[in-house]
Amino acid sequence: MPSLQTGPSSDTAARSAELFARARAVTPGGVNSPVRAFNAVGGTPRFIRSAAGAWLTDVDGNEYVDLICSWGPMLLGHAHPEVQAAVQAAVGRGTSYGTPTEPEVLLAEEIVARTPIEEVRFVSSGTEATMSAIRLARGFTGRDVVVKFAGCYHGHVDALLASAGSGLATFAVPGTPGVPTSSTELTLVLPYNDRAAVERVFAEHGPRIACLITEAAPGNMGVVPPEPGFNEFLARTCRAHGALFISDEVMTGFRASRQGQWGLDGAVEGWAPDLMTFGKVMGGGFPAAAFGGRADVMRRLAPEGPVYQAGTLSGNPVATTAGLTTLQLATDEVYAHIGAAADTIRAAVAEALSAAGVPHVVQSTGTMFSVFFTDAPVRDFAGASTTDSAAYAAFFHAMLDQGVYLPPSAYEAWFLSAAHDDRAVQAVLDALPVAAAAAAARSTAGGH
Ligand SMILES: *Cc1c(COP(=O)(O)O)cnc(C)c1O
């Protein structure tokens, strides 16, 4: 019989372990996206059977407070009744037609109303959004070179799975086997938050640069906020050189705040990115993503312009209905609630780790935050890389054993939802001292 008490130990993960073994026989690593496999923390990923509000239930019947929230999308919590009802009604009308539909128009209008973009095109994943935005930037400018930052993740686009070359202004090398050198030899990779490096590559390669793409606030190396004015500086630098500024808000969009990171650090400054990308929250838990921006740029896209881009399921009526309903319900109160819960958990994590003598840096942007197990400042990927991943793994498993499902990697943001009520937050707080002690025992800094 499933154990429903908190504090599941690994022997209550028998059914997850069995499914994981079967999954590994038929799927590489047993998962459909690498981080889910627990490689960074060890152990058996819990196979989730259902979720409601802030809680996950695994196939063994264990319950967990969810601090992954599907890596961001579940802003309102799982199985939100109004989103469920809208989705069920949409499914009842058929699931895909390959024709234009009303929900696409409504979601496009909602996104255009909330953000600085003038026109938007829907796709099915964040990867497609960034890939298409870069193609459009290249088509619009007639240039080839793309600039990105180390530690920023923009999906698994070949040209962006790149590592810095031997010098700052030298072209990148493939970041993974399978990406040909020809896919990264037009990519430049710079340290994040480094204005001098940006100025240098634009001075050297400016006339060839089609675009610079950045996470609006990096969340994929843990949360590393842009230093004040950094995004605006990037936009101005791009403009001065005739390149497009692409702000990737796949993670931060409608998550960091009601308007995303742009609403936090740009809305009042009178500037806007040329192109933006969205995903995660705007799909309401379905595969939907988007890129959009200046009308004169977007009008270069087929069928209005010559730059080709297409998708069989793009703008899918069920996915756009889920996204639209989610955005309509994502009021200022929702963000205020998530922000308050995030503040409480952040402060408690810092307190528990301090009490246990574990070095840590807690960073946030809007309602997103993450914890680095380091005492070095974290303003770029080199800083993020100093995190003690063995200490994090110990912390992670102690939390999991107490019924809290954290991201199974030290380099990920922690996500909350509007459904994280006092009971869920308290369950996280209650688990922290034991987890902090576990981290201290494994910390290379030695703890007390
Ligand atoms: C998740 C993410 C992507 C990729 O989105 P997928 O839907 O996983 O392809 C791109 N950019 C950022 C900033 C992301 O966080």
Image: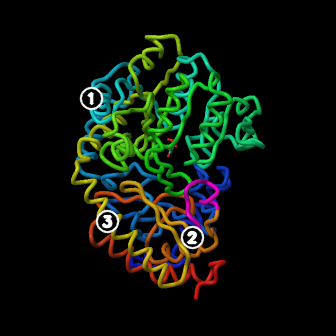
The answer to which of 19 and 152 lies nearer the viewer is 152
Nearer-N-terminus badge (1/2): 1
Q: Is residue 362 visible?
A: yes
Nearer-N-terminus badge (3/1): 1
The answer to which of 22 and 432 lies nearer the viewer is 432
Q: Residue at x 45, y 80 (%)?
A: 352
Tell me the mark number nearer the camera, choosing from 1 and 2: 2
To which residue does mark 1 refer?
106
Residue type, numbered disc 1: Leu
- 106 to the left or right of 177: left
Q: In which quarter of the image is the C terminus?
A: bottom right
Q: Which residue is drawn at 62% across and 31% down?
A: 202
Tell me the mark number nearer the camera, choosing from 3 and 1: 3
To which residue does mark 3 refer?
341
To which residue does mark 2 refer?
373
Secondary structure beneath dot 2 equals loop
> Is residue 291 rendered magenta in the image?
no
Tell me the mark number nearer the camera, choosing from 2 and 3: 2
Q: In this view, does 287 lie above or below 363?
A: above
> Is residue 375 rendered magenta in the image?
yes
Q: Decide whether the magenta segment is chiefly helix, strand or loop.
A: loop
Q: In which quarter of the image is residue 292?
A: top left
Give the magenta range: 374-385
| Separation (CA) of disc 2 from disc 3 | 21 Å
Residue 339 in picture, x, y percent from top left: 31, 60
Q: In which quarter of the image is residue 154?
A: top right
